[in-house]
Image: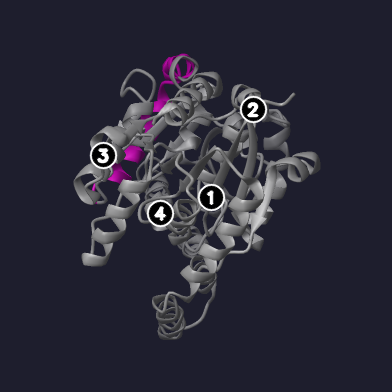
Amino acid sequence: MNCKRKLLIYSDCYIYGGSERLMSFLIKNPLIQENYNITFAYRNHKIYQNGINKEFNDQEKGELLFPVSIISNSTLIYKINLTKFPVIFKLILKSILILIDITRIYSCYNIISHIITIKKILPDIIHINNGGYPGAKSCNSMVLAAKLLHIKHIVYQINNIAQKRTGLFDRQIDHFINKSISCFITASKLASDKLIKERKFQVTKIKQLPNTVIDESPTLSRVELLYDLSINPSDFILCTVGFLTKRKGQQFLLEALYQISQKQPEIFENIRLILVGDGEERQFLLDFVEKHKLVSNVFFIGYQSRSINYINACDVFVLPSIANEDMPLVVLSAMSKGKTIIATDFAGIREEIENGVSGILISPKIDTIAIDLANKIVELYKNRDYLFGEEANKRFNNLFSNQVYGQALINIYNSTLNEK
C-alpha cells in the first residue's frame, strides 16, 4: 500500500535557469522520493520545455512532470529583448503587453488553470518555486487557487532578493500571501532579511535552507573537451557559466582580460576563457570581444545542459555577478569539483565561499570589479598551489550536499504538515 503523501511542486520562469535546476535536484532527491509522491507542474512554453527535455528522461517526464497552460508576458518580453528591433519599437510592444496584463485577464485565466491542476493532483502539500519576489505573478495565482480549494499546507520558495514594494496594491497582495503561506524558504540570510524588511513577511514563517546541486560526473575529460575546442591543455583555463545578462557581470570579466592583455601580454597569451550560456547580452559581448581583440582567447559555447564538463575542465571558475543573486548553483557545482573560485562578495555567495579559505571574493562595485578580477586572475596564474579548491570541496560536502539538502527539506515539509 502506497502511504506516501502527495507533493505538488509548481514553478514558472521565462527561462530554464538556476532555480529551475534546483527543483530538478529536489525532484530527483532519493530522500524526498522515498517520502513523497512528487508531481512537478510548470508553465508550458518552448524555452522552458527545452530545458526540461535536457534535464529529465522520457520515463521521468511521464511519471513526474505536468506542464500547465499559463499566460505570462515574461517570455514574450524576453524574446522581444533578444530581437534586433529598434529600441522604440521594443518599448511599444512591451507597453502593449503590460497594458493587457493590467486588465487582469491573464490572472483570471491562470487561477482557473491552477484550480484544474490542483483538483487533478489532489496534493497534501504544495511547494511553489519563484525566481524572486514578486517574481512570476502566476506563483501568487497558485497561492490564491490553493486557498480557494482549501489547501492548508503551502511552502513558498524565493530564489532571489525581494524587491521593494511599489504601491498599496503590493501591500494587499503581500498581506494575503503572508497569511496564506505555511512557510517561506530562502537560501541566503540576505534574502530572508529582505523579505522581512521590504515585504514585511512574518519572521517566524521564514526558513533558511542553503541550495544544493547533484554531484554530477563529467562526460568529457579536460583533455577531450579542450581538444574539441582546439585549446592547448597547458593553457590557463577560466570558465564562467550563466545567463548572458548585465547582472551576471560577464562584461567585467572581459574587461579584466582586456586589461591583462594590455599590461601583461605574455600572461594573456596563455589564458583562455570559456563562456557558457545564452541571453540578451550575447551580441554586446561578442562585439566587445571583437573590438578589443580578444577573439582568440574567448570561447562562446552557448547554453549547455552538461555545463559540468566545462566547469570540470577549468583551472579557475569565475562568477562576476553584480546584482540579483541569492545562492548561485554554479558556485556549488564548482565547489563540488574542487575548483578554485573567484566570485563577487554579496548575498549567498559569501555564505558559499569563505574568502581566502575556500575561494576568493571580490567587491561587486562596478568601478573596481574589472581591475580586481584582473589582479586575482594574474595572481592565481602565477601561483597555482593554493588549496582553495580542496577546501571548497570539503565545504560543499559538509554543508551543501544533496543528502544534507534533502533531509532539511523533508524536515520543513513534515513540520508544515504537522501544523494545526
Majority secondary structure in the magenta region: helix
Location of mark 3 (residue): 363
In magenta segment, residue 118: no
Q: Is residue 8 visible?
A: yes
- Mark 2 residue element: loop
Report the Cα–Cα distance between label 1 and label 2.
Answer: 22 Å
Look at the numbered discs 2 and 4 and tell me whether their residues touch, using CB distance below 8 Å.
no
Amino acid at the residue labelled 1 = Ser
In the picture shown, does residue 215 fall above or below 188?
Answer: above
Q: Which label belongs to residue 409? A: none
Asked whether 112 or 66 is in front, the reply is 112
Q: Quadrant of the N terminus?
A: top right
- Mark 1 residue element: strand
Report the Cα–Cα distance between label 2 and label 4.
Answer: 48 Å
Location of mark 2 (residue): 4
Highlighted range, magenta: 367-395
Mark found first going from the N terminus, 1 or 2: 2
Seen in the image, is 192 located left or right of residue 16? Answer: left
Asked whether 67 or 292 is in front, the reply is 67
Location of mark 1 (residue): 11
